[in-house]
Structure formats: structure tokens, C-alpha cells
Amino acid sequence: EELLFQGTLADDWGLLPPHDLPDPNDSKPESWIDDAMMDDPTAVKPANWVDEKRIPDSEGSKPPEWDDDEDGEWEAPKIDNPAYKGDWVAQRIKNPAYRGVWEARRIPNPDFVDSPELYKYNDFGYVGFDIWQVKGGSIFDNIIIADSSSLHDVDAFAAKWRALQEVEQSQKKKEEEALAAAFERGRAARAARAAKDVAAKDAAAKVEGSDTGSSGIAKSESASSADSKGNAQSSQAK
């Protein structure tokens, strides 16, 4: 038998308050380093790195009507710097002083009260499953709910279910084989009908061609007879 999951209602379903909780009086030490990455202290910005985004327009010139006394000192307009490479950032490396994510120490929860008979109900009317699946049509049946005092019932039920499953699988296989055979018979019948239709069309085409040939011969013979009769009449006239 394959064990898919094992747990408790209290631990896995949150039906009881937690056994312990973070100590509200605990605080992270000032020396605690929780930055996993840091800037490389040996990294140096290249000398040719251009991080000035806007520069004065070298082609700009002060307008003739500009008066420094009235208009102030003239400054060339700014344009986008074609050599701009963006803000330089040092390479990131692992922080050797990293100590992990800090968590407050755990203390017993004063509100926790254990309930050994949390599972116990006089009657179970329904069983629910919270399952994520990618293919619909799954059926869940043959469910047994028991405790440690009735494990023999679980074993007997498992044996009965296994025997039933073997019968169901065998019946399913027979049905699938019968369905596949019926499909093959249907496909063969369709192929036979298609071949019969093609043969009938070919035979009809041959008959039509034969009739056309006979008509041509008959017309030729009639024409020859008419020519002979005409020649005879011409001879008598002479």
C-alpha cells in the first residue's frame, strides 16, 4: 500500500491555537546582518564611464537680442548626452557577514489547550477534499474513517477495496477493447463503402465513354452511306 500523506488535524489544519508563538519582547540585535548580497568593495567605476545624462548643446549660440544685463547670463540649452551609459552600480557579491533571516525566539502559547479527541464526532455526514487538479472527472469513493482502535476494520476494508478495484480495472479493460474493436469495424465499413462508390463511378464513366464511341461510329456510317448515294445520283445524271 502506498502512503500518500500522514499528519494530524491539530498540526495540519489549524484547528487549535499554535503550541508556541514569537516572543513579542525579543528584538533583532543591531549587529545582525540580514543582507544576503552586498556591493563589491573592490569594484571601481571605469574612467571612461559617462553618467552625465544631459549636456550643453555645443551647437547652441546666444541669440543676438540677448541682453546679459536684462536677461541674465546666457546658458546653452541642454540635450541628451549620446555617450550616457546610465548610473554606474557596483557588482553585487555574497555578503560574508550574512547571518540569515532573523526570527524572534519562540515561547509557549499561554492560550494553547490540547484536545486529544479533536477528531471525535458521533456522526460523519460528509467528507470534503480540497484538491488542485489539472484534469477533471476524478471520482473519490470508498472512504473509511477510523481510529487506532479499529485498524483491523481498515485492513479488511483495504483488502475488499483492492479486490473490487481489480474487478473494475478488468471490466474497464474489456470495455475499452470492445470500443476499440467497434471503432475498427466502423472504419473498415466506411473504407469499404468508399471503395464501392469509387468503383461505381469508374464503371459509370466507362459506360458513358463506350456510348459516345458507338454514336460516333454510327454517325460516320450514315455519312458514308449518304456520300455513296450522292455519287450514284451524280453518275446517272451524267
Image (spheres, rainbow, N blue to C red):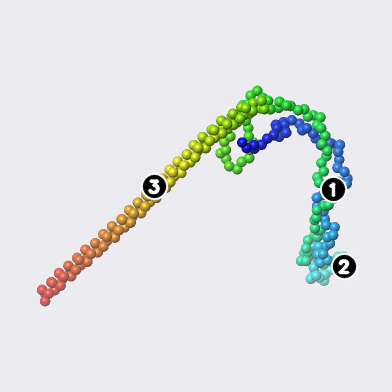
> Which of the labelled discs sits on residue 68, or is there none?
2
Please report whichever mark, 2 or 3, sits nearer to the chain's N-terminal start: 2
Q: Residue at x 38, y 51 (%)?
A: 194
The residue shown at (37%, 52%) is 195
Check disc 3 and give the amino acid type.
Answer: Ala
SS of the residue at dot 2?
helix
Which residue sits at x=87%, y=66%?
A: 73
Contact flag, marks 3 and 1 (Cβ < 8 Å): no
Find disc 1 in the rendering and name its residue.
33
Which residue type does callout 2 highlight? Asp
* Mark 2–mark 1 CB contact (< 8 Å): no
Q: Is residue 134 visible?
A: yes
Horizontal arrangement in the rendering, residue 232 relative to residue 198 (left or right): left
Q: Position of residue 87 (x, y in %)?
A: 80, 59
Q: Amino acid at mark 1?
A: Ile
Q: Which residue is mark 3?
A: 189
Side (left or right) of 210 relative to 9: left
Identify which residue, 166 or 182, lies in the foreground: 166
Other-residue count near label 2 (Cα within 10 Å), few / some / many at <14 / 14–19 / ≥20: few
